[in-house]
Image (cartoon, rainbow, N blue to C red):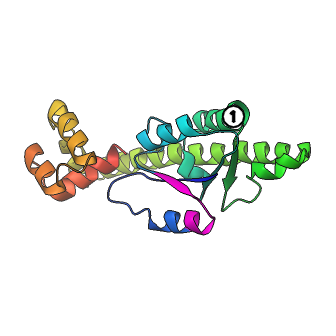
């Protein structure tokens, strides 16, 4: 069975482009998560993995939709292809397609594994560079007296209250406006807070 997996980092982002591509690729079932790609603690991803069989092909639009942590992406790839013995196909990178390895051509399998190593490393590196650029930007702004501690105020929220309400928000039982009201922050501040923690 062709199984699609789509992911965006936050509730505010749209899955439409990925879903359209997965449907066009013939996916019969699609799992979706709206959560950060920093690790694989994702409800729909875990459900997909638990239901995968060796007859399945997991299809994703791009490797960073699988995840952004180099070690974890390569480990999950190994789990899918070596333990479960399912196939993986990355639509925007034809070299990452283990279905071609079904012919028994070791070169194809080797190339797919090598490309995966490179791309997952690059995705992880980009995630680290984003963090570094943010820290450098804040340091420069502070030196120039342009930093008004906006980011620091966001961290003064009640963490326990945030944890209780983020679950309700993610499950669709709490609107963003109500979530912001309960935390006593504005909607834009809540958006920034959610983005920082994605």
Res. 30 visible in picture: yes
Q: Residue at x 83, y 47 (%)?
A: 101
Q: Position of residue 168 (x, y in %)?
A: 21, 43
Instruction: Determine the secondary structure under disc 1.
Output: helix
Q: Quadrant of residue 106?
A: top right
Q: Residue at x 49, y 68 (%)?
A: 17
Check the image and report above or below for 50 versus 31: above
Question: Closest to the observer: 129 or 4?
Answer: 4
Res. 108 visible in picture: no
Residue 182 vs residue 174: left or right? Answer: left
Q: Quadrant of residue 73?
A: top right
Question: Closest to the observer: 180 or 97?
Answer: 97
Q: Position of residue 158 (x, y in %)?
A: 14, 34
Q: How many marks?
A: 1
Q: Position of residue 189 (x, y in %)?
A: 20, 53
Looking at the rendering, in which quadrant would you find the C terminus? Answer: top left
User: Circle 1 is placed at which residue position?
Assistant: 78
Is residue 27 one of those drawn in magenta? yes
Q: Tell me the magenta residue range.
A: 21-31
Question: Closest to the observer: 1 or 174?
Answer: 1
Q: Crowding at label 1, few (<14), some or many (≥20) Cα neighbours within 10 Å?
A: some
Residue 94 vs residue 31: left or right? Answer: right
Check the image and report above or below for 181 versus 15: above
Q: Position of residue 152 (x, y in %)?
A: 22, 42
Is residue 179 one of those drawn in magenta? no
């Amino acid at each position: 069975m062709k199984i699609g997996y789509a992911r965006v980092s936050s509730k505010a982002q749209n899955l439409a482009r990925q879903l359209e591509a997965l449907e066009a690729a013939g996916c019969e079932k699609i799992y979706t998560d709206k959560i950060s790609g920093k690790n694989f603690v994702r409800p729909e991803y875990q459900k997909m993995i638990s239901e995968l069989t060796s007859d399945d092909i997991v299809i994703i639009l791009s490797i960073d939709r699988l995840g952004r942590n180099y070690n974890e992406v390569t480990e999950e790839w190994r789990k899918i292809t070596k333990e479960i013995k399912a196939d993986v196909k990355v639509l925007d990178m034809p070299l990452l397609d283990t279905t071609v390895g079904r012919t028994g051509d070791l070169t194809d399998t080797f190339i797919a594994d090598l490309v995966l190593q490179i791309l997952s490393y690059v995705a992880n590196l980009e995630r680290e560079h984003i963090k570094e650029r943010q820290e450098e930007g804040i340091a420069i702004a502070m030196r120039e007296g342009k930093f008004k501690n906006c980011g620091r105020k966001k961290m003064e929220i009640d963490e326990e209250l945030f944890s209780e309400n983020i679950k309700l928000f993610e499950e669709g039982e709490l609107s963003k406006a109500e979530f912001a009201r309960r935390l006593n922050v504005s909607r834009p501040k809540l958006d920034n807070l959610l983005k920082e923690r994605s």
